[in-house]
Image (spheres, grey):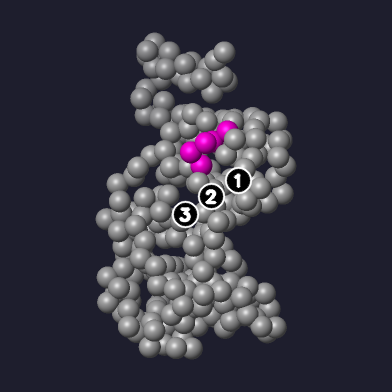
Amino acid sequence: MVSMDEQVLLSLIQKVKNGLLDENELVRQIKAMPFRDLGEVKFDTHRALRKGFAEIVYCPGKSESQLESIASALVDAEANILFSRATAGQYEIIHRHLTDAVFHEKARLIGVRRNELPPCPGLTVITAGSSDVPVAEEAAVTAEYMGCTIERLYDVGVAGIHRLLAHVDVLQRSRAIVAVAGMEGALPSVVGGLVSCPVVAVPTSTGYGANLGGIAPLLTMLNSCASGISVMNIDNGLGAGYFAALVVRQSK
């Protein structure tokens, strides 16, 4: 049976053959083609055409049947696939249909690598403390599936700033840096004063009471006097990795 997407595509191709549609308009319409309707889920099958990377599936709150329908729809996908904030149980559900899926437990990501992208070096991911590593790993693994090679520097926060300064050479040759910190969130400001590349700051909910679940480091990062810093939402490693990967890939 020909799917709705295939019917639309065949119709567009026929219009090009008949001279009713030029090639540029064909490309524009393909990029705007509809999502795949899976009932409760409307999966954006053409996001990679528009954004450069396929839709990332957010797992929390999704039922077993929803995850199964999404995984089944992706069996023949050629692009790299990511499921975010996943549990081991959700991995078992997805793995039944996507047998090449890998569970990155620390990053809470399920990944399927179908497209070996040309390696793109220059992205460094750093954390203030070891408690910030899960958010940093979410950023690093996301960027790896987008083709970046990652330099990881963990537990180099300002409470022992000599640990950070020992790696200044790595920081200064980076094309972009993801800096992940909880507590008061000072790390991105310090890094921003040492490097010329963009710094993507990620506040985490790690910290004692006045950390306020990540609001304290968020405000610190938003108020940084160092230039070249962009700030993600609290614990948003995925957004940071995605954004930093775009920066690095476009800086080649």
Q: Is residue 43 visible?
A: no
In this rendering, is residue 39 above or below 157? above
Kindly identify the amino acid type of the residue bearing the numbered disc 2. Answer: Phe
Q: Give the residues drawn in magenta, as a range.
A: 97-101
Tell me the distance, in whole angstroms, between the alpha carbons under discs 2 and 1.
Answer: 7 Å
Residue at 64% x, 40% y: name it.
93
Q: Secondary structure at mark 1?
A: helix
Q: Nearer the viewer, mark 3 or mark 1?
A: 1
In this rendering, is residue 11 above or below 233? above
Residue 220, given in percent of the width and then of the height, sits at 55, 81
* First reached walking from the N terminus: tag 3 or tag 1: 1
Q: Which mark is residue 91?
A: 1
Magenta span contains residue 100: yes
| Residue that label 3 marks | 142
Q: Is residue 9 visible?
A: yes
Tell me the distance, in whole angstroms, between the alpha carbons under discs 3 and 1.
Answer: 17 Å
Residue at 48% x, 42% y: name it.
112
Count of labels in the image: 3
* First reached walking from the N terminus: tag 2 or tag 1: 1
| Residue that label 2 marks | 103
Q: Quadrant of residue 218?
A: bottom right
Magenta span contains residue 64: no
Tell me the crowding category of disc 2: few under 14, some 14 to 19, or many 20 or more residues within 10 angstroms, Cα based: many
